[in-house]
Image (spheres, rainbow, N blue to C red):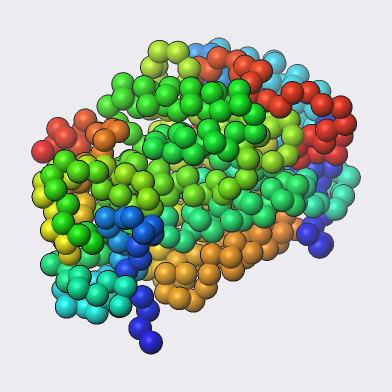
Amino acid sequence: MSAPALLRLAPEDDVAVALRPLAPGDPLGPEFAGLVLREPIPLGHKVALRPIVAGAPVRKCGVPIGRATRPIAAGEHVHVHNLASAVLVNALDHAEE
Amino acid sequence: MHGAIGYLRADGRVGIRNRLLVAYLVECAHHVARVIAAPFAERGVELVGFSGCYPNPYAQDVMDAVCTHPNVGAVLLVSLGCEEFDRSRLHRTIAASGRPVATLVIQKEGGTAPTVAAGRAWIEKTLPELERVPRVPVSLADLVIGTKCGGSDGTSVLSANPAIGRASDLLVDAGATVIFEELGELFGCEEHLASRAARPELADELRAVMAKARRYYATMEHGSFGGGNITGGLTTVEEKSVGAYAKSGTRPIQGLLRPAVRPPAPGLWLMDMIPDGPVLWGYPNINDTTEVVELVACGAHLVLFSTGRGSVVGSAVSPVVKICANPETYRRMAGDMDVDAGRILEGRGTLDEVAAEIVAVIARVAAGEPTRSEALGHQEFVLGYKHFAPLGPACFPRPAAGGRPAGGRR
């Protein structure tokens, strides 16, 4: 039996977390039937479980962890390129952009 | 905790280590203190200190608390001579605690070499005295345990942090005192925190310190969130906060501390490490070690330290138990890790099993077994400048007769 691939921490979550490094085409198990990875997802990183519109809150563990900065497709890697904090943005990180 | 025999101090607290500290009171005395301590590294002599030349009540309080910590048996103070740190007050505080103490002033001793010779002679004379500290059995109820994370990643919330949370509940239920902190990593958790306050007036205090934390980090334009977190899969400080909050378990929050204020009763406590007043002197905590030092100053005998990316730090005063969230990191850095929590991700264990293992490791470390960071000689210590206003009465339980103080027998 292969180890589980993804974990959804709360039923209402928009994202699941990779329990090992994943690549497009990897089987994700019955809980994630229909979800197709669009890109590699490193261990501990997030994948969108459904389409998310720009500006919408993104939920993990049942709580908002920020807002989508652009439309996110199901199966896409969710990270700093498409999700931003609603609380604090580090000015120095911004300065490098 | 079968077999753990601690060191009974005059104030009634019981230590799980019997260290002799060499403390520099300004950066100009740091080298001399390090040279004094170096030959005794294998004999329980550790280096601590404060770099600043200008006085700071917070730093003075932390040094008082560290030098009279139950894991400490004796202290040698090393002063240059012209710094503004109040060495006389610190010396008096240590002496009043019943511990052997000496102060060497480099400018009076005649410079580096004479101070090193005098310091080493005092340590040689004092180490045998430490052997005569009364020994008593230690139970979990005698212990104050700090929790913190460093080098968090996307695995932290899945394994190490919730396992620490369950261990925290087990410890509280066994009568121990547990302290969590890291207010800069509790954003979005404010109402959860408030709902766990042991008293209604404490809930308002918890909301107020979290509002202070938001203001402080907003002014700094930088949160407790960095590039390593991002590489590890965390995207925002709210996301990191969910993981950090999981370390606190589920028990009621008894009150609010600040660094160098000891919890007056057992149970779960939150340490507010965000300075009061206008933003001064920079980030609330410039690195993980400053927070470990603050937990130690609150009396923590031992610190549970969760890491995903792979931290190696220890502490000069209290053993640090490293709980690794990420199975890849564990395989790469097993020599620095005390608990493999990442095995949960690979189906080789459950949160409850790892929580029970954490409590078992605490018992072994309290009985004298060195943590990985201790065995590797880690003795990190950093102390900077801060300002704190006194804590209000809402932060503490109303006085009750016959209560048992935290981490002590009187």
Q: Residue at x 37, y 26 (%)?
A: B214
Relative vertical location of residue B140 with respect to residue B333 in this rendering, above or below: above
From the top left corner, tell me how far across and down residue A8 is, in percent: 35, 62
- In the depicted view, which residue is nearer to us: B176 or A8? A8
Q: Residue at x 39, y 36 (%)?
A: B187
Relative vertical location of residue A60 with respect to residue B25 in this rendering, above or below: below
| Quadrant housing residue B233 | bottom left
Which residue of the protein is positioned furthest toward the front in this rendering? A12
From the top left corner, tell me how far across and down residue B83 is, in percent: 54, 14
| Badge count | 0
- Which quadrant would the N terminus of chain B be assigned to in this image? bottom right
Relative vertical location of residue B173 with respect to residue B284 in this rendering, above or below: below
- In the depicted view, which residue is nearer to us: B344 or B193? B193
Q: Is residue B286 left or right of residue B110?
A: left
| Quadrant housing residue B153 | bottom left
Q: Residue at x 58, y 65 (%)?
A: B352
- In the depicted view, which residue is nearer to us: B51 or B270? B270
Q: Residue at x 20, y 37 (%)?
A: A93
Can you see residue B402?
yes
| Quadrant housing residue B203 | top right
